Amino acid sequence: MSTSTEAAPAARPAAGVPVLQVAGLTCAIGGAVIVDDVSFDVARGEFVAVIGPNGAGKTSLFNLLSGLLPATGGSVTLDGADITGAAPAARARRGLGRTFQASSVFAGLTVRENVRLAAQAKLGGSLRPWQRVRDRDAAQDVATRSLQRVGLARRGDGLAGALSHGDKRKLELAILLATDPTVVLLDEPMAGVSIEDVAGLTEVIAGVHREEGKTVLMVEHHMDVLLGLADRVAVMHHGRLLALDTPEKVTSDPAVQQAYLGEQL
């Protein structure tokens, strides 16, 4: 693996047909380049950790992939379809799921209703909880399975707002699973989670990857968590892709160590 920061690497997954292809992805705002010529492929079912110092462009990269930021160069291809100019909702319908650093659930609805709404929208119904569901039983079944997957089945009738922060993160994953995404972008899912809840949440994320077969890209500052989950690690630095390889190779790369100011990963 090259340790040069002169050019963005275009590392490819070790095996499998890419489900996500990013080519020369760039975003410049007001003359400042925040994501600079990033290229990589992700194989179906792969887990890619995205790391980098603060301000490296990790969340900006996710915003470009999910359509919250417009690309000023390059392309994004999902399952063979060019989604570079697609709106966030269109990307979600094509199978790109996303969570955010800040927890976002309907606090005044029950845990189950939060997930049912997502399932209902996926099945073609309304997002309005007071309107008739096109296929309520199907949406309820999906919600039940999703809650079981993340370990919240027994909390289904309680208000989402009463959950601990860690359980709200699990609820967000259940909501995401209810939409049946192909590729899942997790942006700092451990942010604000108590140390006691990290292990449980890590287990849920690992299950989403292994047992649900989801392709996962995850930004996280808990390095021990990431390195234990990832097939490959992508390192962002100054908006560029500095390295993309196995956890062992990335953590021993002198350029990566320099990017982290000599900190041990």
Image: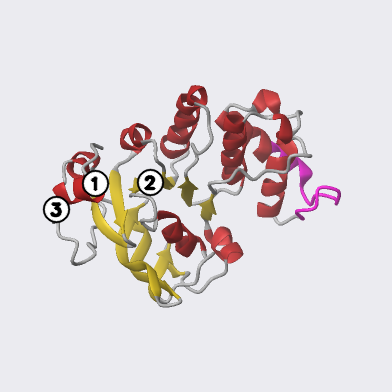
- Which amino acid type is marked by label 2? Gly
- Which amino acid type is marked by label 3? Met
Q: Is residue 84 above or below residue 265?
A: below
Q: Is residue 47 magenta?
A: no
Q: Which residue is mark 1?
A: 261
Q: Mark 3 or mark 2: name the one nearer the start of the chain.
A: 3
Q: Mark 3 or mark 1: name the one nearer the start of the chain.
A: 3
Around disc 1, counting alpha carbons within 10 Å, would you say few (fewer than 14), some (14 to 19), or many (20 or more)?
few
Q: Is residue 237 left or right of residue 153?
A: left
Q: Is residue 132 left or right of residue 205?
A: right
Q: Which residues are magenta?
A: 126-141
Given contact means CB atoms under 8 Å apart, are the residues at marks 3 and 1 in contact? no
Question: Could you tell me which residue is drawn at 57 percent across and 43 percent down?
Answer: 177
- Counting from the top left corner in percent of width and height, residue 66 is at 50, 61
Of tags 1 and 2, which is closer to the observer? 1
- Counting from the top left corner in percent of width and height, residue 201 is at 50, 30
Q: Is residue 124 above or below residue 154?
A: below
Helix, strand or loop at label 1? It is loop
Q: Is residue 195 above or below residue 106?
A: above
Query: In the picture, residue 55 is in which quadrant?
Result: bottom left
Image disc number at residue 45: 2
Q: Main secondary structure of the magenta part?
A: loop
Residue 247 seen in render: yes
Around disc 2, counting alpha carbons within 10 Å, would you say few (fewer than 14), some (14 to 19), or many (20 or more)?
many
Question: Could you tell me which residue is drawn at 68 percent across and 41 percent down?
Answer: 115
Query: In the picture, residue 38 is in which quadrant?
Result: bottom left
59 or 182, which lies in front? 59
Image disc number at residue 1: 3
The alpha-carbon separation of the residues under discs 3 and 2 comes to: 23 Å
Helix, strand or loop at label 3? It is loop
